[in-house]
Image (tube, helix red, strand yellow):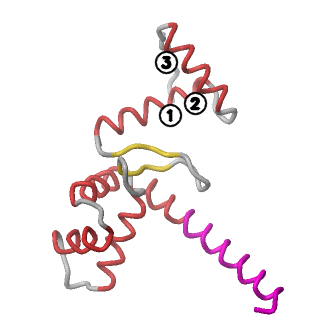
Amino acid sequence: MSPSSVRFEPRVLARLAAFVAAHPDLTVSSASNRLVDEALRVHEHPLITFKDGPAGRRARVVGGPDVWEIVGAVRSIRESDPALVGDEVLAVVAETSGVPMAFIRAALEYWGDYPDEVDAFAERARAEVEQAHVAWLRQQELLGQ
């Protein structure tokens, strides 16, 4: 990564400093990089936004589910009925999830540009679910249930 000098307007710099203060894991440089990268991604994919959560920051459809969840639903439908293809798959996902077709397409377009990121997040989420399930099973065993 090459260094670059950027001059912020005073009000923008003050907001950036407040953002960094509220996110102690970030520096001014890393926060600027993240915010610019996300702004560019939103410009490229207008129906996508970003959200923090227990498993980390992830892409999601505006007002809807996470991108990885939609991609997972598409994969699940394809695995359960390989004869379904294209719009047939999307129609089943839309019908079973209640997510509008435009949002499903937006999620798939985002995944098409950032598959490694989306798939890595899905894997982290699956690992967290598995850990929570194992912990719950241990508790049930201790309680004799």
Mark 1, mark 3: which one is toward the viewer? 1
Overall secondary structure of the magenta stretch? helix
The residue shown at (34%, 55%) is: 111
Locate the C terminus by quadrant: bottom right
Reply yes or no: does residue 127 show up in magenta.
yes
Q: Residue furthest right?
A: 142
Residue position marked by numbered label 1 in the rendering: 34
The percent position of residue 60, horizontal first and vertical second, equals 40, 51
Quadrant of residue 101 in the image? bottom left
Mark 2, mark 3: which one is toward the viewer? 2
Residue position marked by numbered label 2 in the rendering: 30
Compared with 18, 80 (above or below) is below
The residue shown at (79%, 88%) is: 141
The percent position of residue 24, horizontal first and vertical second, equals 69, 32
The residue shown at (29%, 62%) is: 99
> Dot 1 lies on which element?
helix
Amino acid at the residue labelled 2 = Ser
Question: Magenta region: which residues?
Answer: 124-145
> Dot 3 lies on which element?
loop
Instruction: Characterize the local packing of mark 2: few (<14), some (14-19) or many (20 or more) Cα atoms within 10 angstroms.
Output: few
Residue position marked by numbered label 3 in the rendering: 4
Asked if marks 2 and 3 touch (Cβ < 8 Å), the reply is no
